[in-house]
Amino acid sequence: MATAALWTPRATAKLVFTNSAVFIHTCANLFCQFLAFLLLPFSAAAFHDSLAYILRLWVHLVAGLIQCFAPSDFVLTVDSSCDERMVQRNKQGDATGITFPKRILVTSNHQIYADWLYIWLVAFAANAHGSMKIILKHSLKYLPVFGLSMTIVDFIFLKRKLAVDKETIVNNLERSKRHKIPTWLLLFPEGTVISESTRERSKAFAKKNDMNDNRFTLLPRSTGLKLILETLGDDPEWMYDFTIGYQGVKATDIPEKVYTIRSIFSLGVFPKKIHVYIRRFRIPDLPLHDEKAFANWLFDRWAEKDEMLAHYYDKGQFPDGRDRLQLPIRLKNPIRDIGMMYVLLLPYIPFCLLAYKLYNMLFCSAS
């Protein structure tokens, strides 16, 4: 079906509603962040904890919108490299949830622009959604409201020039280590999503360097990841790698042409199941001493990822791991989870009343 045919009045109304809801919630988020600064002179830990809690409340809206307009489930496959205690179980031994260390680095393949959103919702499923730190292109820093809010929670904005970005990366990660802030640092080593043009660039790079190009991923870039890992040292200890497959995407598709952020939230075109294969690597054990050795290590991991995706497209699921569990993207209490953001704004009421009173005294009385 052509995309234009999907733009019904109902779809347009959904687009206006979701965009307005996200903008209003982000404005509320920003004002709550301003209040958190009142804690900074007394306790840096309380300040960072408050920002994390406020970020959790922002993600609750996204989870609620997914629940209402794009209901879907995660199918998480946990590799044998992961800790046995990672999967939570009930008394009957059934898998009911998942947990991660408080500070981790997350890498992933990059198929659609909504990848970062679904990975954030994996963190939501693990009750770690207030810990996300995303690496973004620098221009997003200047988005009205959103850019300032992301700056306050210390997202990393890069100009994609290592000579310029190196200091930004190192300073940001050193702050995170110094304050022991719980962190999910998210990085896409491919740099961008798959498209006709990026696929051709990947093929050209592979040919120039006498390598095999991947079929379902782009060849990753190792320089930025190596810098991040060297800066982190042994804190965090683990790098978790996600391989994502979306139900409804075929092996011959360009994934971003199947699912866009707009289609997911407005057009009713969304993945019913998001398959994620999770494995982990101990950062101190990686070959960071040699640039070429690390690049080859990363290329090998992406070749393995490509084979896992080939299996996924053939079988409809990833290869078996230690565990497999299905988790719905769903709020436990939507009214409380979303409404709490606005409860935090109550301290502004006295300021608003005082401003109104001063306005009346200065302007209305004069007239």
Image (spheres, helix red, strand yellow):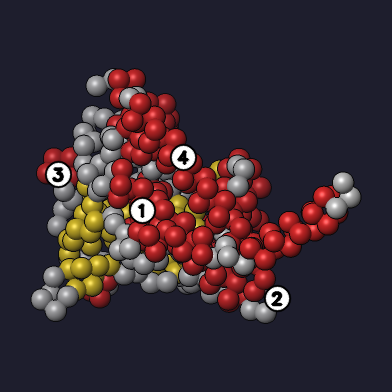
Q: CA distance from mark 4 to mark 1?
A: 14 Å
Residues packed near mark 3 inside 10 Å, few (<14), some (14 to 19) or many (20 plus): some
First in residue order: circle 1 vs circle 2: 2
Q: Which residue has dot 4 on it?
A: 19
Residues packed near mark 1 inside 10 Å, few (<14), some (14 to 19) or many (20 plus): many
Mark 4 or 2, closer to the camera: 4
Residues packed near mark 2 inside 10 Å, few (<14), some (14 to 19) or many (20 plus): few
> Residue 257, how many percent across, how many down?
33, 29
Residue at 10%, 76% in the rendered image: 92
Q: Tell me where residue 355 sits by quadrant.
A: bottom right
Q: Is residue 361 left or right of residue 237?
A: right
First in residue order: circle 4 vs circle 2: 4
| Viewer-proximal residue among 116 and 90 | 90
Q: CA distance from mark 4 to mark 3?
A: 33 Å
> Residue 161, how many percent across, how many down?
61, 43
Mark 3 or 1, closer to the camera: 1
What type is the residue that disc 2 sits on?
Answer: Pro
First in residue order: circle 3 vs circle 1: 1
What type is the residue that disc 3 sits on?
Answer: Gly
Q: Which residue has dot 3 on it?
A: 316
